[in-house]
Amino acid sequence: MGMDIVNLNHLMETLKCLSDKNITIIVSSHNILNIAMLSDRVCLLGNGSIKCLVDIDKDNPDDSRSYLEKLFIKYYPVREAK
């Protein structure tokens, strides 16, 4: 979601409205905070497979962000350079 703040806010509001109508939305992003604010379920993918699928609390994005960061570190550890 690399865009200016006006369009990002518009996109976030649009996605929230769709979510409130129980419409499933699939978003691919590396921006964990935006995902935490929008999502109630998150799937981490890697090498063509599901690494984990978790429910999160979008009403508490700071806790969700921290939780998602820990999951990301768990499933995608930093590799040392050769």
Image (spheres, rainbow, N blue to C red):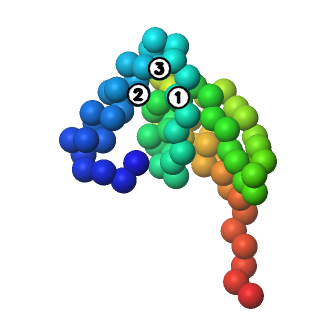
> For the point 27% across and 33% down, which residue is it?
10
Please report contact status of discs 1 and 2: CB closer than 8 Å, yes or no.
yes
- Check the picture and name the quadrant holding the C terminus: bottom right
Instruction: Look at the numbered disc 2 and give the secondary structure of its residue.
Output: helix
Q: Which three-letter amino acid code belongs to the residue tagged 1?
A: Ile
Instruction: Look at the numbered disc 3 and give the secondary structure of its residue.
Output: helix
Q: Which three-letter amino acid code belongs to the residue tagged 2?
A: Leu
Query: Which is more toward the observer, 20 or 74?
Result: 20
> For the point 36% across and 33% down, which residue is it?
12
Residue 63 in view, yes or no: no
Please report contact status of discs 1 and 3: CB closer than 8 Å, yes or no.
yes
> For the point 25% across and 50% down, which residue is it?
4
Question: Eyeballing the image, is 76 above or below 28?
Answer: below
Please report contact status of discs 3 and 2: CB closer than 8 Å, yes or no.
yes
Would you name the residue on which mark 3 appears? 19
- Residue 25's disc is 1
| Lower sequence index among marks 1 and 2 | 2
